[in-house]
Amino acid sequence: MSAELPEIPEFSPRQNAVLEQALKLLVDGGEKALTTSGLARAANCSKESLYKWFGDRDGLLAAMIAFQAAKVRTFERGAGRLTADLLREHLEIFGRDLLEVLSGDVSLALNRLAIGQASREGSKLGRLLIEHGRRQIDRRAIGLMEAGRRAGLLRFADADGAYHTLYGLVVSDLHVRMLLGEPGLKDNARQAAKAVDAFLQLYGVGPDTENA
Amino acid sequence: MSAELPEIPEFSPRQNAVLEQALKLLVDGGEKALTTSGLARAANCSKESLYKWFGDRDGLLAAMIAFQAAKVRTFERGAGRLTADLLREHLEIFGRDLLEVLSGDVSLALNRLAIGQASREGSKLGRLLIEHGRRQIDRRAIGLMEAGRRAGLLRFADADGAYHTLYGLVVSDLHVRMLLGEPGLKDNARQAAKAVDAFLQLYGVGPDTENA
DNA sequence: CACGAACCGTACCGTACGGTACTTGAGGAG
DNA sequence: CTCCTCAAGTACCGTACGGTACGGTTCGTG
């Protein structure tokens, strides 16, 4: 097929500043607070410029998602030789990072925005959010899974299935609860550690699981 | 510690019909489609009656949540003597029912509504939705957990923790994905079975887990 | 029949938003 | 200095919503 990443709009610094302000407005007051007039006032720009740059309000929202996704680039940990302890540590770090990202103000606000918009418009924003926001973290996790298998530390038939199991163990219903307005956990690290314990019990190979 | 269920507004049949129509509008067109004028037209009632019955628009939304929660009353399975197979079956049925409920049109629409409203208004609707919508299913699951433990089939320190593990294994990130507009699974039963397998591997006691 | 309550249908009001057009001013090129 | 471009600021328009007021109708009750 054709090139899969034609959409790196690469906004100008001025536009980045405006998008930053837009995210701030969205985080502070929800979607209702993000009006074109309000954004123009807060960012010291004109509505006309907003419409020139982003087309219409939906274009602005899409640009906000792309902008935020480009900011939160998760780094691939260089996987050296994996030991059981190292794998566990990497998994726990992944779990903590995941909870950290999902409970972030901006992430929650953008997810709320896309979910609120999901009924109409063919859930365009929802797809955009899943594509841009999840690809990075999914790739990192799948990489971790397969590195663990190559090192003989994990056993599974389906890396994607194993990853989704880990995701469920880490997140459970926390994401939806936070989206609904509940406060997050006090201790993400503890939650991640418990999840990784369970995950290794299910998929692990080695001393940790033999002496159960 | 006073009485915990003072809110059974017990709407009149006419009001029930209007709330039903309101849910239909919400499911079909999202929050934007649920206008007071539109509801009055669709339900053949007057706006004045809407405001007399529900106070204002937020009151209407709250009434819709209470109404729907009152409809989806999950039945407590009478727990006879539990065997391992029976426990597994009950767990799988629970998982299927859970996925069924979460992927339902009305549930998704109400969750989207509450999430969209969560930023402002102190997430009143979100709390309402969690309280009314989850209590039933939580009680059923916790009951199942403790019945399994009493029968010597499950081993855990924290029933709530075990339940949340089961929840995560069953649902993973499906709920959020569906809220964002993705289609649900083709085979809920298979997903529930796999989740229960993993759950019993973690918390089960008996032949299923000994000969791993 | 007469009365009153409930309620439908509609018209109405104020407001606030998305989007467009126009004026002003700053800076860069010739 | 002059012209041109870009964008800020403002004024404006159409629309659509939440909420209120009012006339007409049905229905139960004495």
Image (cartoon, coloured by chain):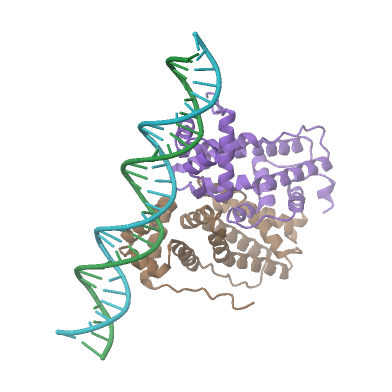
Chain colours: A purple, B brown, C cyan, D green
Tell me what residue is drawn at x 55 percent, y 52 percent: B188
Q: Is residue B43 left or right of residue A200?
A: left
Tell me if residue A110 can be seen: no
Q: Is residue B97 left or right of residue B144?
A: left
Residue B135 lies, in percent from the top left, at 59, 66
In the rendered view, would you say A60 is above or below B125? above
Residue B200 lies, in percent from the top left, at 70, 57
Tell me what residue is drawn at x 61 percent, y 56 percent: A177
Q: Nearer the viewer, residue B154 or A91?
A: A91
Tell me what residue is drawn at x 82 percent, y 54 percent: A212
Tell me if residue B161 can be seen: yes
Q: Is residue B32 left or right of residue B165?
A: left
Q: Quadrant of residue A69?
A: top right
Residue D21 lies, in percent from the top left, at 30, 67
Q: Quadrant of residue A183?
A: bottom right
Residue B90 lies, in percent from the top left, at 61, 63
In the rendered view, would you say B109 is above or below D2? below
In the rendered view, would you say B116 is above or below B17? above
Number of marks: 0
Q: Nearer the viewer, residue A32 or B204?
A: A32
Q: Is residue A178 left or right of residue B32?
A: right
